[in-house]
Image (cartoon, helix red, strand yellow):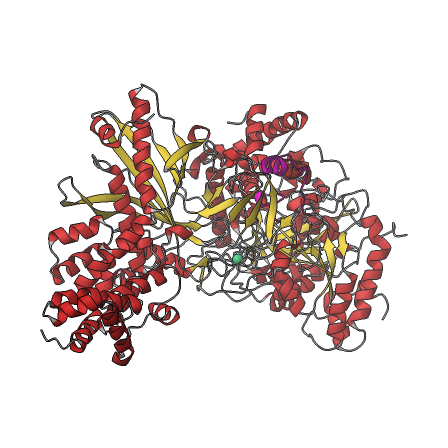
């Protein structure tokens, strides 16, 4: 199952928005290969078929809140941590066309 | 009073209540000790002297009272406290001051607990040695050249070295219990859903759980009761009363209980010295009147791979929000680069190697072609591990094992071998996958370094940990590190 | 290059699909307590949860679940007995967590339909059943303002500004199955579907369904194939934000695809962006290099398992479906089939019925909506339903005329005032000073002046040519700026000239 290529790591890095240089890609590819080799052991579990996947440790259902408005944060607090802000909004560099 | 830092939380609270000392003096004594030794230990990332003394003054003025009023505490830097820097051990959040309090912090504040500052940790709680902190490692008070465990090495080192009688840790795969084991302190991962996660910076949402660190079982119980209980802001919070942990710690009687030794949590990977102390601990439990049986949990062998698929998968999604837009670091915004480039540069420089490794691993495991074989399969195995626990708890009231497979190892030893580091969590991970509570408490030394005994209980039966732990502790009080390195 | 719509549809068979996003009208957001009111100052309706601050956790809004179930029931869907939210992972700055909390393979509602009416070539109405695939609940994104480029366009902008007030508002996505057999009128079916859906949602009271404010938004899928062939490759046109645009988007896509297919080119599976100004779409991201969303069950939320008794209660309490109500009222009002069709085609039938419901006589309601209001809508390029006047307001204007305080001419001015945003009809009457002058003393002067100014006409009337009074009535009306009641003026003129009819 394992065996991850450098190109695959580069693709994953793009999906995860990580600008990795060539040496980092190489190092990660070989480390991931080892790690995936180890975790691939999970495939050996023969009695997993038909078992319900467990997504939550606690079997709760229908946890909801009433539709009631609660005071929002003061805007100064909202923008205080922003790397850049303008006109009460978060300022970001230009967005690439193809991202829409 | 002589050295206030040597007192337990219970003793401090009692002394303040009796007027034998006051909260400001207690806080100052601990702040002084931090100032004196933390340069060598590096347990703290941020010390909030002003905030601590302010709370202490309010306790002394009688504005707040309660079983832990005036007791100092060290807060793992993964939990947000309004206005106090929270970094999660990462460069990507350097300088961020949260505009809100975590539920745990709200509860600590209203209990009059004096928060001394934020403790060091592996970045985003990913690690077992605190060496993955972007701000440098924490040292083990038992031997400064060794790791204090991780990810919550700062909290356990602070408690072990008398910088604080109490600390808050978080435990996703063992980050409270393994540090407790290798520093000779008590650490408890409560039942998942027992303590609110609101304000706990998420690593793996379905596994993360905050809990108490202390030097005694009773202190841990007192802190457990303060922080636990239903929180409507956390959808996974259990709407039931808090298990009677303090009562159980007082009871400390295990005669007639059945204790199961997990066959699979021994052997390969466990140091002989650790196994020896563990065997002696089991004998002690027998001597205290418990019936000891061996139980088998065959799927525990797959706990580590299941964990290293589930946790990185959830982390890859949880950590997506660190994108240079709303808070934290921004790198390379030169007016020319696009947002995508700036985001990718920021994340590449803001996250450390281990975090990036896990993000890539998680991104891979969730990808459409691999989901069923990895993430999906891991969740099925999680069900099977839970089934193993359920079957074992039909045979025994609690389960025991070594908390960590080794004693504290030298700094740097496993840094270049991720898998070796991951194996530190062999014994602790099953309880996270299942959701049940588990404790590590000291059970002696091996080569002069602490060994931890792990006790695991069924979901929402946290009190059983304290009952067994307190009974065991009575036969073997926590060891005190030599602290011969102190200047 | 394009092939005309009608011609294209003689050669190809269309398959359409619609994804509609509806912002629910809850008071608070989907997963936090922030206010959802439209138009607040940027980033003032935000908190740790909807800003995606580290450590914050979501909790589901109960009303949003209820509204979604009610929508599902109104669309004849099956309601899930157990379902979960999932994370849809992708990076975009208007999405604070860089994943959208949505539903993936376990939607709340599945497998329903909506019947819509379209007209045939001969003008008769035909019912088309649009099958519904799913109705699910998710959260809206923030809004991004692009600065420094051509007016608000992302292309060429120097930087962008983000406002998260809208982030986290509950959003319901309603997805049709592929709609086949729409023959020569896929665009008309698409428009009728969205119009009907909007009426259903409005009737349920779950959303204000204002397309111009973005609370109802559509993506339109279109493919063409030769009769007998497999379905063609589809394109997805986004940003289709008015009823007219829904129709235009399908129409232009049919014309574009037909031209390509005719030339033997293949259709690229892609996202296209619709431009309101030109009515055309341009190519966006190619779906063939689509991102991998890495869906997985949201670990911060627990499953939703609607109680079957609760669902039954909600079903029993559903309002009458708009189509049923329409049929009932048509019958009650004894509208002719032709009249009903004319109103349907003009997009005013529901408005007429609602105006009647609000107390106006059917004839008056019909005249307003097919007349002055339809013309106004047409000249400003919007659908009558999008005009900023409500059926209730129209009914009140009708009432004022019937009560004698407005003339027909004044009523039109009042309606224009309401349309111009001057407030309620009564307020427009007051501020514009449009009340009828029924004080006969005040009119007497105007009557005398009119007689003096046109002695010829006055003489003719005195001589028995009563029809000549029209000219004098006109003078008086002009002098009183339309505020007089013409019949009263006529009576006063005749009295003054000593003529009886
Ligand atoms: Zn909010």
**Looking at the image, is B206 positioned above or below residue C252?**
below
Residue at 9% from the left image edge and 70% from the top image edge: C464
Q: Residue C184: give x, y in percent of width and height.
A: 21, 34
Which quarter of the figure is the C terminus of chain C placed in? bottom left
The one of A28 and C256 positioned closer to us in this rendering: C256
Query: Would residue A66 be found to the left or right of residue C357 on screen?
Result: right
**Looking at the image, is B357 positioned above or below residue B62?**
above
Query: Would residue C379 be found to the left or right of residue C363 on screen?
Result: right
The one of B40 and C327 positioned closer to us in this rendering: C327
**Is B343 in the magenta?**
yes
Q: Residue B53: give x, y in percent of width and height.
A: 78, 67
**Looking at the image, is C374 positioned above or below residue C229?**
below
Q: Main secondary structure of the magenta part?
A: loop
Q: Residue C385: give x, y in percent of width and height.
A: 30, 54
Query: Would residue B278 be found to the left or right of residue C407 on screen?
Result: right
Residue at 64% from the left image edge and 34% from the top image edge: B336
The one of B358 and B334 positioned closer to us in this rendering: B334
Which quarter of the figure is the N terminus of chain C placed in? top left
Taking the view exactly as shown, the residue that stands out farthest to the bottom is C441
Magenta region, residue range: B320-344
Residue B474 visible somewhere in the drawing: yes
Residue at 29% from the left image edge and 35% from the top image edge: C251
**Looking at the image, is C346 positioned above or below residue B341?**
below
The one of C499 and C80 positioned closer to us in this rendering: C499
Quadrant of the image occupied by residue C93: top right
Residue B184 visible somewhere in the drawing: no
Q: Residue C426: give x, y in percent of width and height.
A: 34, 71
**Is C23 in the magenta?**
no
Quadrant of the image occupied by residue C237: top left
Query: Would residue C101 be found to the left or right of residue C393 on screen?
Result: right
């Amino acid at each position: 199952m394992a065996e991850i290529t450098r190109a695959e790591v580069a693709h994953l890095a793009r999906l995860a928005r990580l600008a990795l240089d060539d040496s980092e890609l190489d190092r990660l590819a070989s480390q991931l290969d080892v790690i995936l080799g180890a975790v691939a052991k999970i495939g050996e579990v023969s009695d997993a078929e038909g078992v319900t996947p467990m997504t939550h440790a606690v079997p709760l259902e229908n946890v909801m809140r009433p539709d009631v408005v609660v005071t929002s944060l003061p805007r100064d607090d909202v923008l205080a941590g922003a790397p850049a802000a303008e006109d009460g909004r978060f300022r970001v560099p230009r967005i690439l066309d193809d991202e829409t | 009073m002589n050295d206030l830092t040597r007192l337990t939380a219970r003793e401090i609270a009692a002394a303040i209540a009796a007027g034998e000392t006051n909260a400001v003096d207690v806080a100052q004594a601990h702040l002084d000790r931090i100032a004196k030794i933390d340069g060598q230990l590096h347990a703290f990332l941020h010390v909030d002297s002003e905030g601590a003394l302010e709370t202490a003054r309010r306790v002394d003025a009688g504005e707040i009272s309660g079983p832990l009023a005036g007791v100092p505490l060290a807060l793992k830097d993964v939990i947000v406290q309004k206005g106090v820097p929270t970094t999660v051990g990462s460069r990507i959040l350097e300088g961020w001051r949260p505009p809100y309090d975590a539920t745990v912090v709200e509860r600590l504040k209203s209990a009059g607990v004096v928060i001394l500052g934020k403790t060091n940790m592996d970045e985003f709680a990913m690690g077992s040695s605190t060496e993955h902190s972007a701000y440098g490692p924490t040292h083990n008070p038992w031997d400064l050249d060794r790791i204090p465990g991780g990810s919550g090495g700062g909290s356990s080192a602070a408690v072990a070295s008398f910088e604080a009688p109490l600390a808050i840790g978080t435990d996703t795969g063992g980050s409270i219990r393994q540090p407790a084991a290798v520093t000779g302190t008590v650490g408890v991962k409560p039942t998942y859903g027992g303590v609110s996660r609101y304000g706990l910076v998420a690593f793996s949402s379905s596994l993360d759980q905050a809990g108490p660190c202390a030097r005694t079982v009773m202190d841990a119980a007192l802190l457990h009761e303060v922080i636990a209980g239903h929180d409507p802001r956390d959808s996974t919070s259990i709407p039931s009363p808090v298990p009677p942990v303090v009562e159980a710690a007082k009871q400390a009687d295990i005669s007639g209980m059945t204790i199961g030794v997990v066959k699979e949590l021994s052997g390969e990977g466990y140091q002989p010295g650790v196994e020896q102390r563990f065997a002696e601990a089991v004998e002690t439990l027998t001597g205290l009147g418990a019936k000891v049986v061996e139980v088998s949990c065959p799927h525990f062998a797959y706990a580590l791979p299941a964990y290293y698929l589930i946790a990185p998968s959830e982390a890859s999604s949880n950590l997506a929000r660190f994108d240079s837009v709303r808070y934290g670091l921004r790198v390379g915004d030169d007016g020319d680069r696009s947002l995508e480039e700036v985001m990718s540069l920021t994340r590449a420089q803001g996250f450390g190697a281990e975090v990036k490794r896990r993000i890539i691993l998680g991104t891979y495991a969730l990808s459409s072609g691999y989901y069923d074989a990895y993430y999906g399969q891991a969740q099925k195995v999680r069900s099977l591990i839970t089934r193993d626990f359920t079957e074992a708890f039909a045979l025994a009231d609690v389960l025991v094992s070594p908390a960590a497979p080794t004693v504290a190892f030298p700094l740097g030893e496993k840094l270049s071998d991720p898998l070796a580091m991951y194996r530190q969590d062999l014994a602790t991970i099953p309880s996270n996958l299942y959701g049940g509570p588990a404790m590590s408490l000291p059970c002696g030394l091996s080569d002069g370094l602490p060994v931890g005994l792990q006790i695991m209980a069924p979901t929402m039966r946290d009190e059983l940990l304290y009952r067994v732990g307190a009974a065991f502790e009575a036969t073997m009080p926590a060891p005190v590190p030599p602290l011969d390195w102190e200047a | 290059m394009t092939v005309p719509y009608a011609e294209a549809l003689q050669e190809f068979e269309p398959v359409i699909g619609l994804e509609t996003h509806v912002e629910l009208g809850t008071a608070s957001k989907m997963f936090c307590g922030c206010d959802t009111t439209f138009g607040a100052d940027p980033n003032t309706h935000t908190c740790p949860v909807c800003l995606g601050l580290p450590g914050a956790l979501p909790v589901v809004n109960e009303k949003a679940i209820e509204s979604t179930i009610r929508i599902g029931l109104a669309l004849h869907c099956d309601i899930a007995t157990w379902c979960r939210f999932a994370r849809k992972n992708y990076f975009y700055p208007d999405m604070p967590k860089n994943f959208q909390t949505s539903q993936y393979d376990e939607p709340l509602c599945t497998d329903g339909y909506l019947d819509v009416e379209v007209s045939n070539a001969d003008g008769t109405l035909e019912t088309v059943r649009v099958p519904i695939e799913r109705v699910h609940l998710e959260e809206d994104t923030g809004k991004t303002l692009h600065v420094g480029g051509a007016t608000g366009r992302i292309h060429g902008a120097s930087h962008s500004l983000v406002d998260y007030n809208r982030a986290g508002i509950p959003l319901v996505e309603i997805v049709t199955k592929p709609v086949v057999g729409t023959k020569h009128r896929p665009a008309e079916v698409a428009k009728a579907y969205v119009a009907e859906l909007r009426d259903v949602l409005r009737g349920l009271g779950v959303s204000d369904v204002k397309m111009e404010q973005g609370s109802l938004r559509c993506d339109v899928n279109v493919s063409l194939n030769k009769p007998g062939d497999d379905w063609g490759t589809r394109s997805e046109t986004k940003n289709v934000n008015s009823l007219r645009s829904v129709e235009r988007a399908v129409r232009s896509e049919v014309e574009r695809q037909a031209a390509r297919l005719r030339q033997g080119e293949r259709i690229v599976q892609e996202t296209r962006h619709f431009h309101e100004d030109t009515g055309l779409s341009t190519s966006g991201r190619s779906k063939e290099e689509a991102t991998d969303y890495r869906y997985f069950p949201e670990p911060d939320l627990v499953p939703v398992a609607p109680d079957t008794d609760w669902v039954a209660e909600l079903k029993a309490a559903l309002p009458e479906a708009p189509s049923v109500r329409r049929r009932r009222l048509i019958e009650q009002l004894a509208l002719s089939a032709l009249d009903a069709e004319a109103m349907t085609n003009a997009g005013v039938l529901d408005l007429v019925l609602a105006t009647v419901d609000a107390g106006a006589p059917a004839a008056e309601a019909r005249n307003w909506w097919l007349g002055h209001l339809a013309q106004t809508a047409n000249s400003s390029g919007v659908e009558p339903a999008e005009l900023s006047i409500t059926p209730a307001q129209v009914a009140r204007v009708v009432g004022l005329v019937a009560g004698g305080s407005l003339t027909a001419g004044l009523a039109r001015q009042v309606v224009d005032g309401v349309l111009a945003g001057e407030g309620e009809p009564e307020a427009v009457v007051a501020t514009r000073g449009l009340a009828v002058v029924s004080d006969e003393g005040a009119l007497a002067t105007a009557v005398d002046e009119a007689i003096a100014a046109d002695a010829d006409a006055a003489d003719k009337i005195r001589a028995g040519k009563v029809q000549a009074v029209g000219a004098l009535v006109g003078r008086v009306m002009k002098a009183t700026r339309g505020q007089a009641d013409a019949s009263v003026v006529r009576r006063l003129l005749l009295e003054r000239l000593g003529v009886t009819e």
